Amino acid sequence: MGKVIAMTRCPFHGDTDPSLAIYDNGYYCFGCHKSGKLEQWMIDLAHEKPVTDSALHKGRTKKNLDSYSYMYGDDAKDFFEKRNIRLDIAEDFKCKYHSGTLLVDTHDIYGNPSGQQIRYINRKPKYKLLPKRVSGEDVYPSYSRCLPHEPLKYYCFLVESVYDAMKLYQATSLPSIAILGTSMKMDLFMKLSVLSRQFATTWVLYFDPDAKVISKLLATKLSGYGVRVVEIYTDLKPYEYNDDDLESLINEVL
C-alpha cells in the first residue's frame, strides 16, 4: 500500500494494541481489516461511532468530579491574574477548580471527551492526565472554543497548553488546539494533517521559547503533508503579553 508512516490504535474497533497502519497513501487495520485511502479517513470516522474505552473513567468517580466548580479559590485567581487571563475566559473554557487544582476536559480526534487534565497550582509535577496515559499518544486535546466544529476559512493555533489557548482566544478570538506539552507521537502529525483539511487553511505554531526545536520539527512534518504552517518565535509565552500587544504580534505575523 505504500510506506508505513505510523502504527496506532484503531478507532473502528476495541483496539488495545496499535494495529492500524498509516501509510503515505492510505490506512489498514490488521485487527478489523478496515482500510481505505488517507483522504477517506475523516469520512469513515464520520460514519462510524468511535469505540469508547471503559477504562476511560477509571480513577474518576462522580464524587471527585462533583467537587470541581467555577468557584475559584484565591490561588486560582492569582494563577490566572499572573497569566493575564480573565476568569470569565477560564469559565468559558470550562476550566474548573477544587482545592489547589484546575481541571479541564480533553477530547480525541473526533471531538469526543477522552478524559481530563489536572493542573496543580502550587506543586509538582504540574500536570496529570486522567485516565493515566501518555501525552501525545492517544490524546487529541481540545477545549470548548478550541477545536472548531465547523469548517474554518482562516487560522487555527497549535499550542502547548490550554492556558495558552485561553490567552490567544482572549486576545484574538481565534481557535486553538492544545497538544498538552511537546510529547508527540508520529500519528499526531497524521491527525493534524487530516484535521487541517477540515478545519483551517493555516496552522499557526506558537510554542514556548524553549520548544523551538520541537516547533520546527512539527512545522517540517506538517509541511510534508502539504499543510500551510506559520511559526511564531518570541522570547515570551502568550500569557506574558497583554492583550493589545499579543494581538499586534499576531497581526504582524499573519
Image: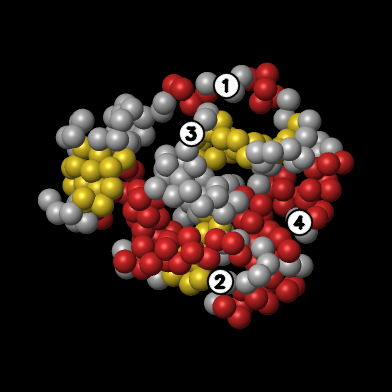
Q: Position of residue 64 (x, y in %)?
A: 67, 22
Labels 3, 1: front one: 3
Q: Which mark is residue 133?
A: 3
**Residue receiving disc 2:** 232
In space, the residues marked 3 and 2 are separated at their CA atoms by: 29 Å
Amino acid type, mark 3 = Arg
Residue at the image point whose x is 53% and y is 29% from the top: 131
In what element is the residue under mark 1? loop
What count of labels does the image hold?
4
Mark 1 crowd level (few <14, some 14–19, many ≥20, 10 Å Cα): few
In space, the residues marked 4 and 2 are separated at their CA atoms by: 19 Å
**Residue receiving disc 4:** 83
Amino acid type, mark 2 = Ile
Q: Earlier in the sequence, mark 1 or mark 4?
A: 1
Q: Is 21 above or below relative to 169?
A: above
Quadrant into which the C terminus falls: bottom right
Foreground: 14 or 127?
127
Mark 4 crowd level (few <14, some 14–19, many ≥20, 10 Å Cα): some
In what element is the residue under mark 4? loop
Q: Earlier in the sequence, mark 2 or mark 1?
A: 1
**Residue receiving disc 1:** 59
